[in-house]
Amino acid sequence: MFGLRVLRQCQLAVWAVLALVVTAPAVAGVFNPEVFTLANGMQVVVIPNHRIPAVTHMVWYKIGAADEAAGKSGIAHFLEHLMFKGTENAPGGTFSELVARNGGRENAFTTQDATGYYQSVAVDRLEVMMRLEADRMINLAITEEEVETERGVVLEERRARIDNDPEELLEEQVRAALYLNHPYGRPIIGWEHEIENLSAADARDFYRRYYAPNNAILVVAGDITAAQLRPLAEKYYGVIPAREIPPRIRPQEPVQHAHRRVVLTSAQVRQPAWSRRFLAPSYNAGVSEHAYALEVLAELLGGGTTSRLYRALVVEGRLAAVAGAGYSPDKLDLSSFVLYGRPRPDTDVAALETAMEAEIARLLDHGVGTEEVERAKKRLQAGAVYARDGLQAGARVLGMALATGSTVADVEAWPERIAAVTVDQVNAAARAVLRADHAVTGVLLPEESGPEGRR
Amino acid sequence: MNIPRRGPFARAVLAAVALALVAVAPARAVTIDRVVSPGGIEAWLVEDRTIPIIAVEIAFRGAAALDPAGKEGLAGMVSGLLDEGAGELDSQAFQERLNDLAISLGFDAGLDIFIGSLKTLSENRDQAFELLRLALTAPRFDPDAVERIRSQISAYLERQAEDPGHIAARTWWEAAFPGHPYGRPVNGTTNSVAAITTEDLHAFAARRLARDRLVIAVVGDISADELAPLLDATFGGLPEVAAPAEVAEAAPETTGAVTVVPRDIPQSVVVFGQAGLKRDDPDWYGAYVVNYVLGGGGFSSRFYAELREKRGLAYSVYSYLDPLDHAGLILGGIGTRNDRALESLELIRAEWRRMREDGPTAQELADAKAFLTGSFPLRLDRTDRIAGILVSIQLDDLGIDYLDRRAALIEAVSLEDVRRIAKRLLDPDALTFVVVGRPDAAGAPPGGGS
């Protein structure tokens, strides 16, 4: 949902938190990427965009937090930090110094399924970035001392993102409860006690095992063509030998039988919050034929101020300050579908929950209407046009797709597939997914309310 | 504007690391047109037909700092209500129109500036401008919408009230600007928001949203000829002149104190700062470079090196210049473990002092210039970002050729300049901290931490 939300100041904080669940869907028919593969197996995607003489250069590794060994949670993210610590050719902070001296902006990210590194630079500096990024694909040098210092940084990141924020702590508990067996239940950044024990050897081992050209995707978006990029890609990445990559075998979810309820009470909370997260298929796992219908369902249920939930709970019911839904299907394994809300100051969270459940029941009993489905589809498709603006969105969407088992063709066909979703498919998807026995309810309460609020 | 080129300096840096470069991309310009409508309304336009979308950014000078005493949050509440019903359309009808046409429209109020942002597919251009016109000139402020937005703001304020970053910032600003509008919360308090009446909302729209306070930027799939009549149609109905209003000049009261707001959280969240420079100060560009070296440069500032890279004390530590209309500030922030928070504060103060005494090195100055000139054009990759930059340039009165001159203004800063300006700007004894957390806690507080 690119640019379709009217962000109100009073909702910004909520969107920030829920960005995890309302990440943009894949958009297509618009990026028109050029693709090729190097002899060593590295995939290359070029997204031409000639507005300004600049590029975003991204290298994705098809490895993420969900691929970590038991007891080593956080190593994928920890390694992402250590990738900035240098190589023999570019020791210490040389990497970031060179990026900055070339006017580049850079960062990196770790998700459950993929890890990415990127720089945005003037196109005449692209080759410098490629040389540096290729260098750290094979020559990373990690010292014990750097690991010790960086552990402090990662722990501060965890505190800033999660431990200091009761809402995030609750979200972490909800995900842990939702996945009974699958590693998606572990936080990407890792559990604190396991971060404490990660070693340089763990990082080197993860790096050697998974960082190789045949497990990587190069995405370059901007003022360049495949013909211009290919010789550079061959020169820098093409010379790196392929290596055998262990298959991504992750424990899968068993059949789930019981609803779970997770309540977090904190003195740091004045505004309660409520969510219900349902196990759901993704583009690549579970009953994936429901994925596109679920995107339409999330939009019509919770996409903005005219959605079902906003209308019923915020506008008409006057119970909630915030109400919405979210779903992101670009996962390698089972995803989740979330409904969320925040009561008005004069309302308790139990009333909000009752109203939410009534909306779910109404949806399941009566189904959705043709008109609301058509409207939601139109808004989603418009998002695909907005996503062409700027260099980042296309690189993100295509990189994530390729890292999670989808293809460029899948991404490019996205608007058509959204257009093809029918009312019956939305209803079937809703009935398959919105099941209490596949879900976790998360409740955030102020300390004085007691464990279950005024229920 | 011109793209970053490899000047003599950049070439030297690259040669030093023995890098082969590809052919230089041809220079291309983002061309800004000044469009003046038949009715005399001016907008800056970047026409770009590559994608069928249009972004509009507008700003009115005069916002939350002008809120009446006891009605703090008025500008913010208006910003939440302009798209909640206007003209013949009630709240849901207005929102439906926006949603069905996939138009994004929103408003936001800061201390000095009231902003509107519109983004539309070009096929819905005229309807999008019409909805913007309605929102600005005929907001309804219907009772149900007003009460809903009021309750949403209250909910937001409740949530903010226990957010450590918010507490730190509020405490800092209140102490720095006692009795001045800059010391008040932009979004008000539950009480002040409760006191705002429908008349207040109408009065704000009628008195503040006027053409003499307005700047406009438009970017994307639209020509000057297409835009000119739309400017009259959209903004012609606004009053010509805003009601007179004055915000007093202010100097922040920064005593160098460290104020602790105790909270049982594992990480201390810190805001710090002192007086800085306003945007029209002749030393602005030098101060911009000094700040970049000190704490402004992502992975390459002194703060980053000393606190994160060497000691692992923080994930995020930074500083920035905050030029308000009536005061200048240099502010910063860090999140750092409770048991070493005081050490972190001392390191920040020490870096502040070191920069004041010695200034940046020649290498740091050169690196700062390379980044600040080279990275800026990267911001021009998206229509809404370009529109935002065009609005800022107008608000700061920098001239329509600013994008062409910006690099030279930064390149002109000398080592002598930054040394002098660092001494003028930075006063470690005035650097004032607010710490939210348990900065003395040696052990783990309840709920986590190490």
Image (cartoon, coloured by chain):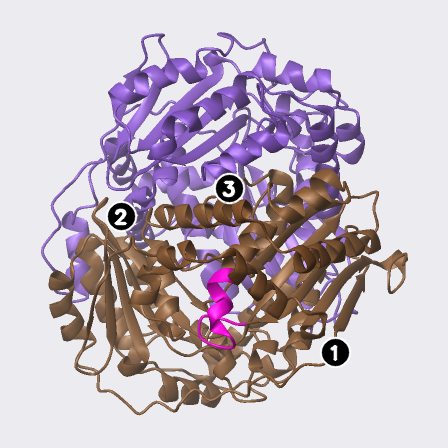
**Image quadrant where one finds the C terminus of chain B:** bottom right
Magenta residue span: A281-293
**Which disc number belongs to residue A122?**
none
* Within-10-Å neighbours for mark 1: few <14, some 14–19, many 20+: few
Disc 2 marks which residue? B374
Residue at horizontal 35 percent and vertical 28 percent from the top: B218
SS under mark 2: helix
The quadrant holding residue B138 is: top right
Q: Which chain is brown?
A: A
Which amino acid, by three-letter code, is at mark 1? Ala
Residue A362: where, in percent of width, then height?
70, 55
The residues tagged by marks 3 and 2 sit, at their Cα atoms, a distance apart of 26 Å
Q: Which mark is residue B426?
A: 3
Chain B display color: purple
Q: Residue at x 44, y 75 (%)?
A: A284
Name which residue type carries label 2: Gly
Q: Are marks 2 and 1 in contact (CB under 8 Å)?
A: no
Query: From where the camera sits, is residue B393 visible?
Result: no
Q: Chain of mark 2?
A: B
Look at mark 1 in the image and give the residue it sits on: A258
